[in-house]
Image (spheres, rainbow, N blue to C red):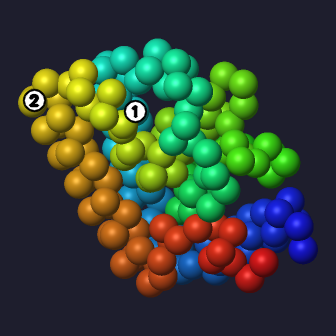
């Protein structure tokens, strides 16, 4: 099975698993996923305020290489909850991230994998003052707590790599 087939199979399997959740569990999970999406947006905004757009453009996104396994089941479910189509990965772009294009990440910040929103290189963090770094770390902790809560609600590791988690 190639990567495109594995992706399609994993997307189908994740959707089917979500549909099997009891109604109350699904609603509770949806609420937490919305919180997760908000935390991700806030983390990206803090990095942007420190100049990440120009820094990342200047280095060409070196930290974004080999991102094939970064997208989790939880990330995919966020698209479902937002009634949005997930990004179509380009697995032929390796070693570049299959979820990126010429202008950078193809995913809006709230849909990006946790790895992608919590990592900031030294150049970005170096532009942050102590208060900004503290706010960044606080948001990261809130994100991690919400992800752990989603895992507890679902009774499974939704934060594992999508391509490794589904019966693909």
Does residue 143 show up?
A: yes
Q: Position of residue 110 (x, y in %)?
A: 49, 40
For label 2, the SS is: helix
Q: Which residue is mark 1?
A: 44
Q: Quadrant of residue 147?
A: bottom left
Residue at point 57% right, 78% down? 21
Residue at point 54% right, 80% down? 22
Q: Is residue 158 left or right of residue 147?
A: right
Along the line of sight, the residue nearer the viewer: 36 or 161? 161
The image's mark for residue 26 is none
View extreme (left): residue: 130
Going from N to C along the chain, the mark reached first, 1 or 2, is 1
Along the line of sight, the residue nearer the viewer: 126 or 41? 126
Tag 1–tag 2 contact (CB < 8 Å): no
Does residue 42 show up?
A: no
Along the line of sight, the residue nearer the viewer: 55 or 30? 55
Residue at point 57% right, 42% down? 64
> Where 123 falls versus 100 (above or below)?
above
Q: Which residue is mark 2?
A: 131
- Callout 1 environment at 10 Å: few (<14), some (14 to 19), or many (20+)? many
Q: Position of residue 2 (x, y in %)?
A: 88, 67
How far apart are the two marked residues, 1 and 2, measured between alpha carbons? 16 Å
């Amino acid at each position: 099975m190639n990567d495109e087939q594995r992706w399609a199979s994993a997307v189908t399997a994740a959707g089917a698993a979500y549909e099997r959740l009891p109604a109350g569990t699904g609603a509770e999970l949806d609420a937490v996923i919305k919180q997760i999406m908000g935390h991700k947006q806030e983390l990206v905004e803090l990095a942007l305020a420190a100049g990440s757009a120009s820094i990342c453009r200047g280095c060409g996104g070196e930290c974004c290489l080999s991102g094939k396994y970064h997208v989790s089941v939880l990330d995919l479910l966020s698209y479902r909850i937002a009634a949005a189509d997930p990004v179509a990965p380009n697995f032929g772009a390796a070693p570049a991230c299959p979820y990126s294009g010429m202008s950078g990440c193809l995913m809006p910040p709230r849909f990006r994998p946790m790895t992608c929103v919590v990592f900031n290189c030294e150049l970005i963090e170096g532009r942050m003052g102590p208060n900004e770094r503290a706010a960044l770390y606080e948001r990261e902790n809130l994100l991690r707590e919400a992800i752990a809560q989603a895992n507890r609600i679902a009774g499974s590791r939704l934060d594992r790599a999508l391509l490794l988690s589904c019966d693909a």
